[in-house]
Image (cartoon, coloured by chain):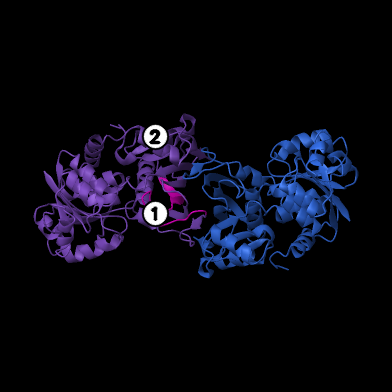
Chain colours: A blue, B purple
């Protein structure tokens, strides 16, 4: 059993903890919180050993009546790997201050820079690069979405270049502070956005330029993707490749899935925990090859959850469980009840 | 004086009426309404002769205490040209039923099909095609936005092809029925959207593919545009061309114009009637030429008003006032107080 510590139990951490505990070959050694929020209570209720991020906060948890097993320093003595799910940029500090001195393997999230680890990860794109590594970064939700469909298309047909526009949700559903409310925000207003270079950390050498805007929704990013293929193909061939690939779900307006809201409604109806959708949704009717080798498609990304199975596979790669990406992906997906592609 | 009848006094009609009455060489002969709404009252207050769309409704206006000069049939005896601003698809019926039998020139809006007139219009793209014509269609707001910047770039540098993603506002600000509220809607989910072929009605033979989504805002469409130029250029050259062109306004996040909401705030602050922005806003820092001849930019389109000056120029072209597009554009823009480009 791989013993996994989860540092940070917010949007990503709580989902990774559930996904890890669903796997046969790993278990949650403990989760680290900074404050006794409802999520800390939930961790205890879920029987995840709760740890404080430092000594000073032990008393805060005690005062709130929450049983804490110790600090993060105690947790890392008792686990094989840490998944760092702390807020953006905190991971870099944690690496230097905690993980390296204590010689513990750690996974970071897409909010950290690529150079923090030198290895970025997306299971379908470059599983093998993480084999046996000590520090790896799982790319962000948008990059994961692009990496999944593009690596599938690249393997099946070949890609000459990619131009993609990312229409990003504003805040997450729980966020009661941020907007926008009635505005489309070029974010950044400069072109290109950072997403292209981020895709290149897992799909080396791919020619990709991305632009991004932010809009007033809380559910799912949407990507308008334009790919020049390296050889002639057809809408049917590309749809077939995507339909057979793991973690990509073909949806259709004809079936009533006409928008990101409807994709999320589907996830609610099939009973996914937290109404998450770990798969990338691609609209069947949007997949169109024109001029022989120019491909277009729309895809939607559930920003809170697509990176969850990636973290699980990343643990397996770093722990050397198997050098076979598809074996790990299948183990993860079966345990999580994802789309059956095997 | 060109006497202009306005059929329909809603979102487009009321703006075209104001723009016509601001010109030195034309006047509003009358406006046609179907119901005695606050807009009908406003027409009377603005001293625009008010006409009913048919005999049956004359009494409805009388009951509401509104002075009506007659029906549309009376109006067309007394004007040189009608601008049809009735709802989508009604124009086709009006043409057959009223304009053709009465031999009166008419302009239609972008909600009608190109084949209704055989001539579509966007002043910077193809002013001369409308010269002396009896029936012309002014293209829609999105197409107008694309036609303005693309015709400018095409004239200045040359275009090999265009790929553009349109992120469309949901409803107009006054619309209290339609959404979306918290969803990104591929609209249509099929690719390409109709905007590309529509641009081709005014920029003949241009290679353009567009995709479109709808988002929960009421103010401005935003376009992410990707152009392959037919020769090498630079960000500076393209920015220079756009900055000097009529009806294109360069904005910048550095000056605080960070989103469509901020573009509209600028329009409010400079005192434009109804807080409209007839110009297309292009973000300076988004204009980027990479690989020598691949251009990217973001532009925002005020959906309610960018087509207004186009209707004015279209009247001049059809009435044969001048064969010089830039002369008409300047007359229109000076009268409306638009960006000074001359």
Disc 2 secondary structure class: helix
Q: Is residue B285 above or below residue B306?
A: above
* Chain on which label 1 sits: B
Q: CA distance from mark 1 to mark 2?
A: 25 Å
Task: Please determine whether, in this image, residue B147 is positioned above or below residue A54.
Answer: below
> Magenta stretch?
B159-182
B181 within the magenta span: yes
> Can the viewer see residue B202 in this picture?
yes
Q: Chain of mark 2?
A: B
Residue B224 rendering spot, x and y as whole percentages = 47, 46
**Identity of the residue drawn at 87% across and 51% down:** A3
Q: Residue furthest right?
A: A77
Q: How many numbered markers are drawn?
A: 2
Q: Residue B31, position in %: x, y?
A: 18, 52
A176 and A139: which is toward the camera: A176
Residue B266 shows which numbered tag? 2
What residue is rendered at 81% in x and 60% in y?
A: A23
Q: Which residue is mark 1?
A: B176
């Amino acid at each position: 059993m791989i013993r996994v510590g989860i540092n940070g139990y917010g949007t990503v951490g709580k989902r990774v903890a559930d996904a890890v505990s669903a796997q046969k070959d790993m278990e949650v050694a403990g989760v680290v919180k900074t404050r006794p929020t409802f999520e800390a209570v939930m961790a205890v209720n879920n029987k995840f050993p709760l740890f404080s991020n430092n000594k000073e906060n032990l008393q805060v948890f005690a005062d709130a009546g929450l049983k804490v097993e110790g600090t993060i320093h105690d947790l890392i003595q008792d686990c094989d790997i840490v998944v760092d799910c702390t807020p953006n940029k905190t991971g870099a500090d944690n690496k230097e201050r905690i993980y390296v001195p204590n010689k513990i393997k750690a996974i970071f999230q897409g909010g950290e820079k690529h150079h923090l680890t030198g290895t970025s990860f997306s299971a379908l794109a470059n599983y093998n690069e993480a084999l046996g590594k000590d520090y790896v970064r799982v790319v962000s939700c948008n990059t994961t979405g692009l990496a999944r469909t593009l690596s599938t298309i690249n393997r099946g047909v070949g890609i000459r270049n990619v131009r993609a526009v990312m229409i990003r949700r504003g805040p997450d559903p729980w966020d009661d502070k941020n907007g926008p409310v009635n505005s489309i925000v070029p974010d950044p207003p400069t072109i290109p956005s950072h997403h292209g270079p981020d895709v290149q950390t897992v799909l080396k050498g791919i020619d990709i330029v991305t632009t991004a805007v932010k809009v007033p929704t809380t559910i799912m990013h949407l990507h308008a993707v334009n790919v020049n293929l390296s050889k002639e193909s057809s809408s049917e061939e590309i749809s077939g490749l995507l339909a057979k690939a793991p973690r990509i779900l073909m949806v259709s307006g004809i079936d009533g899935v006409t928008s990101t809201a409807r994709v999320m409604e589907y996830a609610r109806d099939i009973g996914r925990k937290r109404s998450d959708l770990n798969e990338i949704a691609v609209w069947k009717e949007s997949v169109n090859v024109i001029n022989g080798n120019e491909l277009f498609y729309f895809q939607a990304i559930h920003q809170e959850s697509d990176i969850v199975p990636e973290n699980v596979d990343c643990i397996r790669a770093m722990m050397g469980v198997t050098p076979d990406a598809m074996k790990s992906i299948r183990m993860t997906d079966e345990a999580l009840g994802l789309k059956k592609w095997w």
